Image: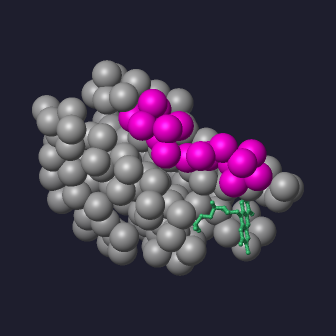
Amino acid sequence: MANIQIIVGSVFGGAEQVAEIAAEKLRELGHTISINTFAAAADLTRDSEEILLLCHSNTGSGDLPDNILPIYLYLTRDYPRLAGKRYGVINLGDSSYSTFNEAGQMLDAAFADLGAVRIGEPLVLDACSGDNPEPLTIAWIADWANKL
Ligand SMILES: Cc1cc2nc3c(=O)[nH]c(=O)nc-3n(C[C@H](O)[C@H](O)[C@H](O)COP(=O)(O)O)c2cc1C
């Protein structure tokens, strides 16, 4: 069973709700979960075995929410040692924006550039689709957890 830290970036609470759904499903599967809504640089490396699950929205014009932006700045300015660090991505956006999911893709790329290893494909949740994110998240988590 894995230790998983869910790092949340949210403006209006949507990504936080999705993080709660993901956490509940992962706990059901026997994993140990923490949810971090104000992640700091040190949280990325606090446990070398810990898996990160990024769960965030996009805001502005292709920007990251303020509560996850410091992580992106840390990755791209300080180049921490994250080679081999395993992580997953839940990226909430809205396809009516020309910058659909772009900030999340930049964050994903910043992890990959440092040698971190993404587990599976990102879950992309499109607010414009009208889909209920809960079943999509539960199904994606079940599949993602099989890859841990
Ligand atoms: C002011 C504003 C700007 C947004 N900008 C983007 C954007 O650039 N790209 C995108 O994919 N979604 C964008 N969105 C959509 C949000 O990412 C989406 O609604 C998400 O579900 C919100 O999650 P949150 O409540 O956790 O912030 C924007 C939404 C708002 C209200």
Residue 14 in the figure: left or right of residue 36: right
Quadrant hosting ligand 1: bottom right
| Colour pattern | one colour
Instruction: Name the spot of residue 134 as percent of width and height, x first.
Output: 49, 45
Q: Quadrant of the C terminus?
A: top left
Instruction: Name the spot of residue 102 as percent of width and height, x first.
Output: 70, 53
Task: Determine the residue located farthest toward the bottom in the rendered image.
Answer: 66
Q: Which residues are magenta?
A: 125-141
Instruction: Name the spot of residue 116 as percent of width and height, x first.
Output: 39, 40
Q: Nearer the viewer, residue 82 or 32?
A: 32
- Is residue 35 at all visible to an observer of this figure? yes
Residue 92 in the figure: left or right of residue 35: right
Residue 139 in the figure: left or right of residue 20: right
| Residue 70 colored in magenta in the image | no
- Compared with residue 79, is residue 135 higher up or lower down, i.e. above or below? above
| Residue 132 colored in magenta in the image | yes
- Compared with residue 2, is residue 81 higher up or lower down, i.e. above or below? below
Q: Quadrant of the N terminus?
A: top left
- Is residue 2 at all visible to an observer of this figure? no
Q: Exactly how many numbered labels are in the figure?
A: 0
Residue visible at 37% across and 46% down in the picture: 22
Instruction: Name the spot of residue 122 as percent of width and height, x first.
Output: 54, 37
Q: Kindly report the secondary structure that dominates the magenta region of the rendered protein.
A: helix
Residue visible at 25% across and 67% down in the picture: 42
- Compared with residue 47, is residue 28 higher up or lower down, i.e. above or below? above
Can you tell which quarter of the image residue 147 is in?
Answer: top left
Residue 140 in the figure: left or right of residue 51: right
Can you tell which quarter of the image residue 84 is in?
Answer: top left
Residue visible at 42% across and 37% down in the picture: 138
Residue visible at 67% across and 69% down in the picture: 59
